[in-house]
């Protein structure tokens, strides 16, 4: 609850701020977008229309550069890791596997998509990435390490966006140093770790400290409002997330008001990081859903909130927009917030991108009364009183619509001045697979990481893949997705969420193959640690380490032997799936261990 006296202070500060920006905190100043007239010759919107939809030239330059400069070595070192694992098991690898990964042919294009599900999903996804990371010596020795380095794309949404955002903006550190912070913290604008011992929303049980904290967060969006932009709950949420997932915060300065806590860091600015400049990271993408006044609610999958027919938006380092054919348009990420000939910069704040992708708060707004009574009711009321705005939803991200007038017959929000972003999983696709289905990206294989809480005990039941299948079917010829079972019961009956499953091994090669790593149950007879509520947001470091160790077993057990022992062939089987589309392109027949592996691990 925000005390009335506090509201008076904030409201006063706002009025003052309009006159004199110097009254704003360093974070509030850094969070404020900057406006200037657009250059007369600027074409803001890029049409990606056409079949297949086209990529930006900057993305093409990035991925092509990565293909030439980075991936040949990355695949070769992954191959050594797989060969080592095969050697230990006395498995002989098909010649084509070595030819393809050795770079004597067309290399596979790998995308990794990591799901929503709050901190549970962020940790689950992080531990899977760690299992695929060559820098993790255990993963390297086992034969799974190296795939992260060889991936072309890395997409996240909601809890998965906490992971992807923090990882890329911190310049791609190892997963342990990302989560736990560096061994010795130089402070300043470096990354201090997820600071998971402090909650995302609730930072203290002491109400004085909690209220002061909320006051500071609200004050940090005052500059943006004073500059004439809508501010909503998502902006305040973004300032809370910034303490955990962007540079500039440590346990020591968590409550300090004289530092920016990552305000001013922009998603487009990631292009300047050394790892990005060297093509050293997979091309990162964050996914959001949208709400529209004109959406077709008969297209909502029961239990979800956003119709499958609404556009899915992506933020990449260069552009933000949608590849869906209803819109098929992008604007430069650095110019997000621009409209009507006014060019805006500094709007694409890293924290706002991850907050938009994880904004599920609108789900509490089943009615005005329900929202008021929910955990965010007092904060919504405080924002409403501090920043009176008409016609703006406060429960979701309000973005000046850069696509006004575009595709009036197919784009729902063509005549709306504001677009509304909400959590990327609200249509039921909790894994951000859609960017991987964009045909111009030529993704051969998607590693799909699913930590959605579908069941009563917060395990995954396959619903996300079912939603992706249903949505892809709405866009025939545009998206191709391999067949997956159409009901969670079939996933359960075949244990498809309980052990890594491959989809699409025997279907048309237009669709990528999917390697599905789900949080479907504990591995190898262990006590479950990975099924906490989506709203659990405080963890001690040893607790996270224990969860990560369990996820490592989930990711590497394969189909366990006698339910307690890992399948020692699994790392080789995964490699077989990784090269399978490239094998087909090369006109090779599946042979040897790859033939038996795929027969065991593929669902058809
Ligand atoms: C737009 O005009 C500026 C100078 O005002 C020039 O530097 C730039 O090259 C022009 N861009 C295009 C696309 O013509
Ligand atoms: C964040 O900090 C890391 C060091 O922890 C640094 O390498 C990186 O460049 C910083 N990122 C930004 C966006 O400044
Ligand atoms: C709450 O925090 C305030 C400010 O640090 C402190 O003065 C007060 O004693 C604390 N209250 C309790 C109950 O610990
Ligand atoms: C912020 O304040 C703290 C405590 O007063 C001080 O130690 C620190 O140097 C200040 N940091 C900056 C960036 O001014
Ligand atoms: C990258 O850095 C350059 C030089 O410091 C700066 O001019 C540019 O604005 C930065 N680009 C982005 C997208 O932040
Ligand atoms: C909404 O979807 C239903 C079911 O497919 C369809 O019959 C209806 O025409 C759609 N309405 C609009 C406004 O597109
Ligand atoms: C841009 O123009 C539209 C339509 O005239 C208007 O609704 C909107 O408020 C304008 N946006 C800004 C930032 O002025
Ligand atoms: C916002 O404030 C206005 C005017 O004070 C009030 O009419 C409206 O109900 C408030 N809305 C919410 C969501 O609190
Ligand atoms: C709640 O949802 C309704 C639409 O159903 C919207 O008009 C309203 O602005 C939302 N309330 C807030 C506070 O965002
Ligand atoms: C699923 O796993 C259980 C053990 O957890 C096993 O008994 C059962 O045979 C498996 N079902 C299939 C179809 O593999
Ligand atoms: C699963 O999540 C629900 C709702 O968020 C929570 O009440 C429940 O305790 C969680 N179950 C477990 C096993 O943590
Ligand atoms: C490797 O990754 C797993 C999964 O996150 C983790 O449990 C393990 O501690 C890591 N090992 C090393 C050496 O970092």
Image: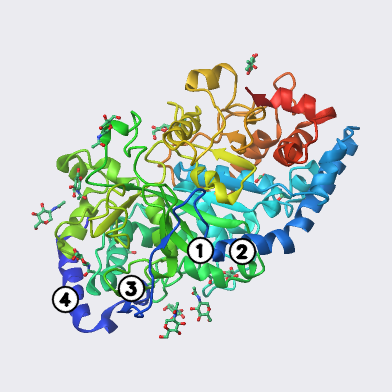
Decide: is 27 above or below 452.
below
Q: Which of marks 4 and 2 is nearer the N terminus?
A: 4
Determine if the C-beta at disc 2 is less than 8 A from ligand 5. Answer: no
Q: Earlier in the sequence, mark 2 or mark 1?
A: 2
In the picture of the structure, the residue carrying the numbered disc 3 is: 28
Q: How far from the left and from the top, in percent, is residue 300?
A: 32, 33
Determine if the C-beta at disc 1 is less than 8 A from ligand 5. Answer: no
Q: Which of marks 1 and 4 is nearer the N terminus?
A: 4
Q: Earlier in the sequence, mark 3 or mark 4?
A: 4
In the picture of the structure, the residue carrying the numbered disc 2 is: 62
Q: In this view, does 575 lie to the left or right of 207?
A: right
Q: Tell me the CA gap for discs 1 and 4.
A: 35 Å
| Residues at marks 3 and 4 touching, judged by CB atoms closer than 8 Å | no
Q: Pointer 3: residues within 10 angstroms few (<14), some, or many (20+)?
A: many
Q: Can residue 159 be spotted in the picture?
A: yes
In the picture of the structure, the residue carrying the numbered disc 1 is: 317
Q: Quadrant of ligand 2?
A: bottom right
Q: Pointer 1: residues within 10 angstroms few (<14), some, or many (20+)?
A: many
Determine if the C-beta at disc 4 is less than 8 A from ligand 8. Answer: no
In the picture of the structure, the residue carrying the numbered disc 4 is: 15
């Amino acid at each position: 609850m925000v005390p009335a006296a506090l509201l008076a202070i904030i409201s006063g500060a706002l009025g003052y701020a309009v006159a004199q920006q110097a009254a704003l905190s360093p974070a509030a100043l850094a969070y404020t977008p900057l406006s200037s007239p657009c250059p007369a010759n600027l074409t803001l919107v890029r049409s990606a229309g056409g079949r297949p939809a086209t990529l930006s030239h900057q993305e093409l330059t990035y991925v092509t550069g990565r293909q030439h400069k980075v991936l040949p070595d990355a695949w070769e070192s992954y191959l050594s890791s797989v060969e080592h694992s095969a050697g230990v098991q006395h498995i002989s690898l098909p010649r084509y596997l070595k030819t393809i990964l050795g770079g004597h042919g067309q290399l596979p294009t790998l995308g990794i998509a990591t799901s929503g599900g709050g901190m549970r999903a962020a940790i689950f996804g992080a531990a899977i990435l760690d299992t695929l990371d060559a820098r993790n010596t255990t993963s390297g020795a086992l034969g799974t390490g190296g795939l992260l380095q060889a991936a072309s794309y890395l997409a996240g949404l909601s809890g998965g966006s906490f992971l992807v955002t923090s990882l890329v903006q911190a310049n791609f550190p190892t997963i342990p140093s990302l989560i736990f912070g560096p061994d010795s913290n130089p402070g300043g604008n470096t990354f201090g770790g997820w600071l998971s011992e402090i909650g995302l929303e609730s930072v203290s049980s002491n109400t004085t400290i909690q209220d002061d904290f909320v006051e500071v967060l609200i004050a940090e969006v005052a500059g943006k409002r004073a500059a004439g932009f809508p501010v909503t709950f998502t902006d305040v949420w973004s300032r809370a997330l910034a303490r955990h997932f962007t540079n500039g915060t440590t346990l020591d300065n968590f409550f300090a008001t004289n530092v920016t806590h990552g305000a001013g860091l922009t998603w487009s600015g990631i292009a300047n990081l050394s790892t990005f400049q060297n093509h050293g990271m997979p091309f990162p993408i964050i996914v959001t859903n949208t709400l529209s006044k004109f959406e077709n609610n008969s297209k909502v999958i029961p239990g979800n909130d956003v119709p499958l027919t609404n556009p899915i938006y992506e933020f990449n380092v260069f552009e933000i927009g949608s590849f869906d054919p209803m819109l098929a348009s992008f604007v430069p990420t650095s110019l997000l917030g621009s409209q009507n000939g006014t060019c805006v910069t500094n709007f694409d704040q890293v924290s706002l991108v991850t907050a938009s992708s994880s904004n599920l708060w609108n789900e509490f707004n089943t009615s005005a009364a329900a929202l008021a009574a929910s955990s965010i009711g007092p904060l919504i009321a405080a924002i409403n009183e501090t920043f009176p705005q008409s016609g703006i939803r406060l429960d979701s991200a309000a973005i000046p619509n850069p696509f006004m007038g575009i595709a009036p017959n197919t784009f729902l929000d063509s005549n709306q001045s504001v677009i509304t972003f909400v959590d990327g999983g609200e249509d039921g696709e909790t894994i951000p697979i859609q960017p991987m289905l964009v045909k111009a990206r030529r993704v051969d294989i998607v590693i799909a990481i699913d930590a959605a809480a579908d069941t009563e005990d917060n395990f995954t039941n396959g619903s996300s893949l079912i939603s992706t299948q249903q949505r892809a079917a709405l866009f025939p010829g545009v998206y191709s997705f391999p067949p997956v079972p159409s009901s969670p019961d079939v996933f359960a009956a075949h244990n498809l969420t309980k052990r890594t499953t491959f989809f699409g091994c025997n279907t048309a090669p237009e669709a990528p193959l999917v390697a599905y790593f789900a949080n479907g149950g504990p591995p190898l007879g262990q006590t479950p640690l990975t099924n906490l509520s989506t709203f659990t947001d405080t963890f001690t470091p040893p607790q996270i380490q224990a969860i990560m160790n369990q996820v490592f077993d989930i990711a590497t057990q394969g189909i366990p032997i006698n339910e307690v022992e890992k399948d020692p062939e699994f790392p080789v089987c995964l490699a077989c799936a990784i090269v399978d589309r490239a094998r087909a392109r090369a006109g090779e027949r599946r042979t040897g261990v790859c033939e038996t592996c795929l027969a065991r691990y593929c669902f058809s």
